[in-house]
Image (cartoon, rainbow, N blue to C red):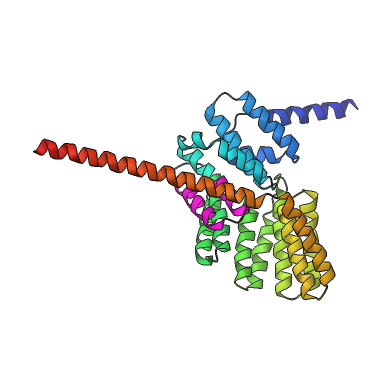
């Protein structure tokens, strides 16, 4: 009993120390939040971090890490609120924080179906992060960019960015190895190359990091890729097996946006087999999940933010142009 209490005390001490330690990067701070699993615990840790911090830069790292974490947990509305709240400070921040903001914003845009804007914001994130020494965030941006470009059917460009991520891996940035390879497998699938997709998927499995808190997301991606390969090779029994595995993971970890995609896929399959009643029941589940996820609302709010940013840039351009005209006028008067 005593040994158990000592063990629990040590775990609690380590747990508190990790959360109270000063954040170094958005990527690793986000990983610390992910370790908490429960959204309630993540929310509490974030609130405590903000309350205990008196440095603006530290607070921004906490906020960006929190938003990054909860986007993957389908809490799009909360992530939007955080990103919107720190916009004024980000405009005056260093390139690393600006780049990290664009990286997280692009991810949210992608999640709510605004792929073109996600590509634009993520491209800007890469531009900013390349000026810094924060290579985890840069690798994350490269991987995400590859995925966004695939969604836009730009396969050649997508492979280029995934190769940039592989180059960083060779330089020692080992994180995100599995998702890099599942993204590469996804491209092979869309190019109707089941053998190559299977090869990349096997490499993704070999690079699974069971110690990472979002290990289950990599497992989910692998299950989806395996199901897609099985569908392509008309091995429908194996496809059903992996879809069920993906559904189990998404249900266990309460990921409604991923569950919605699975139900939609299963409904399509059922319809193709003539099982219209099953297809209808699955689409009812999709509709139910749509009501839980405020994707359209967040998409509209993000569109407003984008327009506000464009208006702000236009004002700056007009102001700079006017200043140049005034200076030129003054110079001409001096010449006269």
Rendered view: 302 above or below 261? above
Locate the C terminus and report the quarter of the image it occupies. top left
**Residue range highlighted in magenta:** 103-130
Q: Where on the picture, by quarter, is residue 230? A: bottom right
Residue shown at 50%/50% (left/top)?
121
Residue 28 appears in the picture as rendered: no
Q: Position of residue 334 (x, y in %)?
A: 12, 35
Tag count: 0
Q: Position of residue 316 (x, y in %)?
A: 37, 41
Q: Where is residue 66 in the image (x, y as percent from the top left)?
A: 64, 38
Rendered view: 168 above or below 57? below
Residue 225 appears in the picture as rendered: yes
Quick check: is 238 in the magenta stretch?
Answer: no
106 left or right of 66?
A: left
Residue shown at 56%/39% (left/top)?
84
Main SS of the magenta part reads helix
Rendered view: 45 above or below 214? above
Q: For the view shown, which residue lies furthest in the left direction?
A: 336
Locate the N terminus and report the quarter of the image it occupies. top right
Q: Where is residue 10 in the image (x, y as percent from the top left)?
A: 77, 28
The residue nearer to you, when weighing 244 against 320, is 320
The residue nearer to you, when weighing 162 against 87, is 87
Q: Where on the picture, by quarter, is residue 162? A: bottom right
Quick check: is 108 in the magenta stretch?
Answer: yes
The residue nearer to you, when weighing 315 against 87, is 315
Q: For the view shown, which residue lies furthest in the right direction?
A: 1
Residue shown at 75%/59% (left/top)?
286
């Amino acid at each position: 009993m005593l040994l158990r209490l000592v063990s629990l005390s040590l775990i609690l001490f380590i747990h508190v120390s990790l959360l109270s330690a000063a954040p170094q990067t958005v990527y690793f701070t986000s990983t610390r939040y992910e370790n908490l699993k429960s959204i309630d615990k993540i929310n509490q840790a974030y609130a405590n971090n903000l309350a205990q911090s008196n440095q603006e830069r530290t607070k921004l790292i906490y906020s960006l890490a929190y938003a990054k974490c909860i986007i993957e947990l389908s809490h799009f509305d909360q992530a939007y609120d955080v990103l919107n709240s720190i916009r004024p400070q980000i405009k005056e921040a260093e390139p690393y924080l600006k780049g990290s903001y664009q990286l997280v914003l692009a991810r949210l845009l992608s999640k709510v179906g605004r792929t073109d804007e996600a590509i634009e914001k993520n491209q800007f994130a890469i531009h900013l992060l390349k000026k810094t020494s924060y290579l985890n965030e840069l690798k994350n941006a490269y991987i995400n960019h590859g995925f966004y470009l695939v969604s836009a059917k730009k396969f050649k460009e997508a492979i280029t960015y995934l190769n940039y991520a592989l180059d960083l891996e060779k330089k020692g940035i080992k994180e995100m190895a599995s998702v890099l390879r599942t993204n590469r497998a996804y491209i092979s699938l869309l190019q109707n190359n089941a053998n190559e997709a299977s090869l990349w998927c096997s490499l993704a499995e070999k690079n699974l990091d069971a110690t990472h808190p979002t290990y289950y997301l990599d497992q989910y991606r692998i299950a989806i890729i395996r199901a897609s390969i099985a569908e392509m090779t008309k091995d429908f029994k194996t496809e059903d097996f992996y879809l069920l595995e993906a559904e189990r993971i998404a249900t266990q970890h309460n990921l409604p946006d991923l569950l919605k995609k699975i139900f939609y896929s299963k409904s399509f399959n059922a319809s193709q087999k003539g099982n219209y009643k099953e297809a209808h029941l699955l689409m009812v589940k999709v509709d139910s999940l749509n009501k839980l996820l405020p994707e359209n609302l967040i998409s509209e709010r993000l569109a407003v933010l984008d327009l506000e940013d464009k208006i702000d840039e236009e004002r700056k351009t007009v102001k700079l142009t006017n200043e140049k005209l005034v200076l030129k006028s003054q110079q001409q008067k001096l010449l006269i």
